[in-house]
Amino acid sequence: MQTNPIQLFDTESSTYTYIVAGPGSDAAVIIDPVDHHCERDLAHIARLGLRLAYILETHVHADHVTSAGRLRQLTGAHTAVPRGCDVPPAEVQLQDGDVIRFGDGETIAVMHTPGHTAGHMSYVWRGNVFTGDTLLIDGCGRTDFQGGSSAALYDSITQKLFALPDATRVWPAHDYKGQAVSTIRWEKAHNARVVGRSREEFIALMDNLHLPQPKLIDIAVPANRNLGLPHGG
Ligand code: FE2
């Protein structure tokens, strides 16, 4: 059965945060929470009668600070991050193929999708995939910092994410055009970065984007390696 996540948006960084909960249990998982929305997210969870079991990150973000550490302090939920992302305070260090179990038999499959960052993970739950910055709607994440690799991103998108069932719903970590959700079928047919390009052409495109650095990168990356908590705190 396909069950949709709850999708929440941060207008400053155009980041999507997701709350995932299956039927038959009050256990919930939050994915990629943003620091200044901690109270908003807790209010959603309380309003729905849910209890936070896990806080997941798809990767160490460069454009916003996570609320993972604070949510852990406030709820007692476990933090789970990709092992390759260098976030030592997270108690669960995820590897490709791991399964996160919560609620009444709910499972989230952990899929290593490097390229935007080296450690980046995507998460698969009930016909949905949370693609972080690996696959965006009609786009993809940049590959020019934090161990990024255009070749790895191409392989993650075309070999791993595009191997999911066509009807799988795609929930990205960002959108800049007001788009909310896509499907693997649509992205395989239309994604503007990937479709009609060879691996070499994709690498050439990505390596010549010349994007400005994210404004918050020097603050966000060290903060996020500590789950958004002050260092030494
Ligand atoms: Fe990112």
Image (spheres, rainbow, N blue to C red):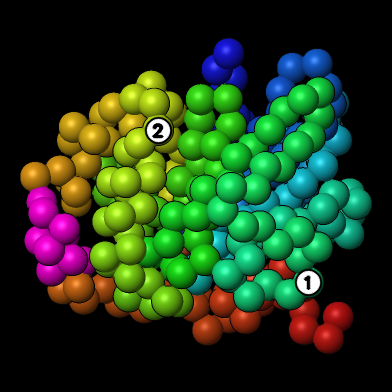
Residue 101, relative to residue 225: is it above or below? Answer: above
Say few, some or many: other residues with alpha carbon within 10 Å of mark 2 (under 14 / 14 to 19 / 20 or more).
Answer: some
Q: Is residue 198 magenta?
A: yes
Figure disc tally: 2
Main secondary-structure element of the magenta-colored stretch: helix
- Asked whether the viewer can see residue 200, the reply is yes
Horizontal side of 203 relative to 2 (left or right) equals left
Horizontal side of 41 relative to 159 (left or right) equals right
> Which quadrant of the structure image shows residue 40?
top right
Q: Is residue 212 magenta?
A: no
SS assignment at label 2: loop
The residue range painted magenta reads 197-206
- Asked whether the viewer can see residue 64, the reply is no
- Report whether the residue tagged 2 is closer than 8 Å to ligand 1: no
What is the C-alpha distance between the residues marked 2 and 1?
32 Å
- Report whether the residue tagged 1 is closer than 8 Å to ligand 1: no
Please give the label number shown on residue 174. none
Looking at the image, is mark 2 or mark 1 nearer the viewer? 2
Give the amino acid at mark 2.
Answer: Leu
Q: Which residue is pictured at 67% across the width and 42% down the height?
A: 99
Q: Position of residue 199 (x, y in %)?
A: 16, 58
Judging by the rendered image, the residue that carries numbered circle 1 is 89
Horizontal side of 198 relative to 84 (left or right) equals left
Judging by the rendered image, the residue that carries numbered circle 2 is 164
Give the amino acid at mark 1.
Answer: Pro
Q: Which residue is pictured at 76% across the width and 59% down the height?
A: 92
